[in-house]
């Protein structure tokens, strides 16, 4: 069995490729980094270092690479794949649509009617709709997209740090936390669900994607923003959470966001399970061995403060439905003042532009132009925090 995986980045190598390889799949990585592709073809394996109280090294074998611009070879791999996966980040997705289309057409030519499921290992809402629309525009009108292609949304919960001491070992080695569960949309598969350890199929997948956004993504960012606001001198997430006041504030904010999630998806999640999930996440966020930084988790404010992302969406949904949102507002307010720097002492490039916009247009201007708030009452709530 063969998995063709677009994206040999940290999530691709430490999570998706690792899961399938350990379950007996050949894994073919498609990537734009020639050095990574060459190393995959030379070594045919790489190490995943698990950062946990019980560290271990996982050797991922039976792998190879193909350079993404080599469309003939990439299309050939797509044509012969048993499963396809994509893990390249939202910004890169439009660039792979043409070669995906070439591969699907070649596959239909060689193996008429052979179905292919695509595991969309991306942290984005409605990834299936994005791919369907993009492929519909790229493929010929008579291509049987609905019949041939399964678009499988996922919830990616694995955390991978920006950099660790292990990254210097070689270009392929990668460090990650021990968490190893890939939640997938049961209803989206057109073929039988792959027999892969760690793959967990769920119904109501949209709700599970929102659980990741409203609780995991939100809580992760909340640690960074509240941690920086109260302890700007601290570097790591675990250092922020070492302050029990920060821990309690983040937990309270995550609980408010969980209440919003239950309002949106009544009957899917219960309070007890969500509280256990929050406690588990806080423990994972505080993992000293992972070495995750406040800078990494909090940066990219334009994206993270956009109307449909982790900070604004829970708050505005709570506000509109008259649900408790005091802590959600505090997290949002803290994010507006986030200026953490990386290992080089510099801010994330977009943050410089973000804070220049704050200086020129004021917080109210940013709340309108970046967050999408037009209600003055909302602006007053945030400005008071």
Image: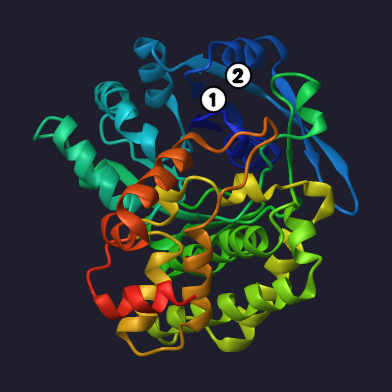
Q: Secondary structure at mark 1?
A: strand
Q: What residue does disc 1 label?
A: 29
Crowding at dot 1, Cα within 10 Å, few <14 / some 14-19 / many 20+, comes out as: many
Can you identify the residue that label 2 sits on? 64
In depth, the one of 251 and 87 nearer the eye is 251
Q: Quadrant of residue 219?
A: bottom right
Give residue 72's position: percent from left, percent from top: 35, 11
Residue found at x 63% / y 57%: 224
Q: Nearer the viewer, residue 82 or 303?
A: 303
Q: In this rendering, is residue 130 above or below 273? A: above
| Residue toward you, 342 or 271 | 342
Q: CA distance from mark 2 to mark 1?
A: 6 Å
Residue 50, given in percent of the width and then of the height, sits at 80, 43
Residue 192 is situated, as x and y percent measured from the top left of the image, at 46, 52
Position of 196 with respect to 351 (left or right) is: right
Q: Secondary structure at mark 2?
A: strand
- Going by the picture, which residue comes out furthest to the right? 54
Label located before the other in sequence (2 or 1): 1
On the picture, is 50 further left or further right than 13? right
């Amino acid at each position: 069995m063969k998995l063709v995986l677009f994206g040999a980045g940290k999530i691709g190598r430490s999570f998706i490729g690792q899961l399938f390889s350990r379950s007996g799949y050949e894994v073919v990585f498609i990537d734009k980094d020639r050095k990574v592709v060459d190393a995959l073809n030379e070594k045919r394996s790489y190490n995943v270092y698990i950062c946990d109280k019980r560290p271990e090294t996982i050797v991922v074998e039976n792998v190879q690479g193909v350079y993404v611009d080599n469309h003939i070879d990439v299309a050939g791999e797509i044509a012969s794949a048993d499963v396809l996966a994509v893990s390249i980040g939202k910004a890169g997705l439009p660039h792979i649509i043409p070669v995906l289309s070439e591969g699907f057409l070649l596959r239909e030519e060689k193996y008429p009617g052979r179905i292919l499921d695509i595991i969309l290992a991306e942290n984005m809402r409605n990834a299936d709709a994005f791919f369907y629309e993009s492929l519909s525009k790229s493929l010929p009108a008579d291509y049987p997209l609905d019949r041939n292609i399964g678009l499988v949304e996922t919830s990616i919960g694995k955390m991978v740090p920006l950099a660790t001491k292990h990254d210097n070992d070689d270009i392929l080695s990668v460090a990650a936390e021990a968490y190893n569960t890939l939640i997938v949309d049961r209803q989206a598969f057109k073929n039988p669900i792959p027999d892969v350890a760690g793959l967990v199929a769920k119904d109501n997948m949209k709700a599970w994607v929102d659980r990741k956004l409203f609780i995991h993504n939100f809580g992760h960012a909340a640690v960074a923003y509240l941690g920086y606001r109260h302890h700007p001198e601290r570097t790591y997430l675990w250092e922020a959470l070492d302050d029990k006041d920060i821990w309690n504030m983040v937990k309270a904010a995550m609980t408010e966001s969980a209440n919003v999630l239950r309002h949106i998806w009544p009957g899917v999640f219960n309070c007890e399970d969500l509280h256990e999930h929050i406690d588990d996440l806080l423990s994972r966020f505080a993992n000293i061995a992972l070495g995750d930084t406040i800078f990494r988790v909090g940066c990219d404010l334009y994206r993270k403060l956009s109307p449909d992302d982790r900070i604004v969406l829970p708050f505005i949904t709570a506000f509109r439905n008259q649900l408790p949102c005091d802590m959600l507002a505090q997290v949002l307010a803290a994010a507006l003042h986030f200026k953490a720097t990386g290992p080089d002492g510099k801010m994330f490039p977009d943050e410089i532009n973000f804070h220049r916009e704050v200086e020129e247009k004021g917080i109210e201007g940013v709340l309108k132009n970046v967050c999408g708030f037009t209600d003055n009452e909302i602006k007053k709530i945030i400005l008071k925090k």
